[in-house]
Image (cartoon, helix red, strand yellow):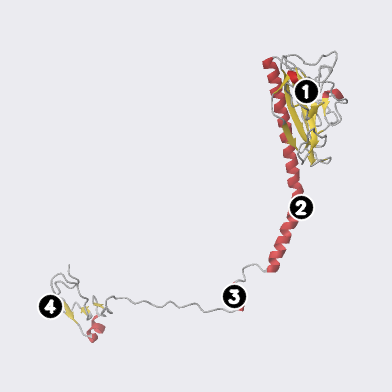
Amino acid sequence: MPIRRPIRSPITYSPKDQSVSPSCSALRAGSLVEACRPWRVATVADNAVRAREPGGFTFAKPRGRYAFTLKKRERPPLRSGRALARAGAGGFTLVELIVVIALISTLMVLVAPAFTGIKSAGDVTNAAYTIKDALEQARTYAMAYKTYVWIGFYEEPAGQPSTNPATPGTGRIVISTIASADGTTVYNPRSLAAIDPTRVTQLNKLVKVEGTHLATFPDGSGTGDTFDSRPAAIYETAKIGDTTPPNPSLTPFQYPVGNPAPAAQYTFVKAVEFSPRGEARINNRNYTLKTVAEIGLQPTHGTAVDVNSRNIIAIQFGALGGDLKIYRR
């Protein structure tokens, strides 16, 4: 299609003017003003008058090849330092920023003990449910496989790697579970001695719980379901804590076990023994069955016992029924 040349003169239409301009006949069919009977080439004066008439309009004369121009963008004026300060009056000054940082630091110091208390509570709660689950699994295993199972408790310093041999301390409870390989007590009830490591099997890996201390608590009143009103264990030989049982077990066992007997890293002198019938007792058959036995737990901060914390827990279990319950203050 041929390119149409732009119209070089303004064209004005007026409803009053029905004359035919001689220039219209020069336009070829198909152009912008095809069938242009009401059109004519107007003068500049006609443009000003006729464009104001009702129904009249004007095509402006194009400038060169395109009918638009570009306007140069103006740069904003530079502002002085004082003007910039006024413009940023809604921001922070250095003094205000320092004051806010000081307030945040003070709040963190005040809130830190609360977060420490929450962590300690979580550690003790985790330890309680870990021990409860271990006791339940040990009793179930003993009854299912008709054998004897022992769960030992050892406490070492928290916040540092375990040594070999282990070092007694405060803040980390180590739990080990073993079972008789032949279904017997392994030890001689009439002549108590350490359990032979070649005649037992390790049931689980060592379990270590941080931030918790084995503790001995006064008996509950036995009148309710709270920590202070829990059933009374009565006998010191029915408790596992920092001062109970009063004497180390006469049938301790070691970790690791195997044949030939490996060197001992841990020696457990506080334990719970389960018989093939599910009976539970502290340490060994030298202790009689008790109606209630108890394991006490208390939170620590590192290797220091938190004596002021009320978040203390007692895990109780019956000798025959195997019922386990957690009491917390």
- 10 Å neighbourhood of mark 3: few (<14), some, or many (≥20)? few
Of badges 1 and 2, the one in the foreground is 1
Q: Is residue 152 visible?
A: yes
Sequence order check: which comes first, mark 3 or mark 4?
4
Q: Which quadrant is home to the C terminus? A: top right
Of badges 4 and 1, the one in the foreground is 1
User: How far apart are labels 4 and 2 at the CA level?
Assistant: 95 Å
* Residue farthest to the right, as pictured: 246
Asked which secondary structure carries label 1, the reply is strand
User: How far apart are labels 3 and 2 at the CA level?
Assistant: 39 Å
**Nearer to us in this view, 203 or 315:** 203
User: How far apart are labels 3 and 4 at the CA level?
Assistant: 65 Å
- Residue 222 image point, x, y percent: 82, 26
- Residue 291 image point, x, y percent: 80, 19
Q: Based on the displayed image, in which of its 4 quarters is residue 218 positioned? A: top right
Q: Amino acid at mark 3?
A: Leu
**Nearer to us in this view, 113 or 305:** 305
Q: Is residue 235 visible?
A: no
Q: Count how many numbered circles sit on residues in the image.
A: 4
* Residue farthest to the bottom, as pictured: 45
Residue tagged 1? 272
- Residue 165 image point, x, y percent: 80, 32
Q: Residue at x 81, y 16 (%)?
A: 285
Label 4 with label 1: CB-CB less than 8 Å: no
**Nearer to us in this view, 181 or 60:** 181
- Residue 189 image point, x, y percent: 83, 14
Residue tagged 4? 26
**Nearer to us in this view, 235 or 64:** 64
Of badges 1 and 3, the one in the foreground is 1
Instruction: Determine which of the numbered discs, if any, sits on residue 110 in the image.
Output: 2
Instruction: Determine which of the numbered discs, if any, sits on residue 84 in the image.
Output: 3
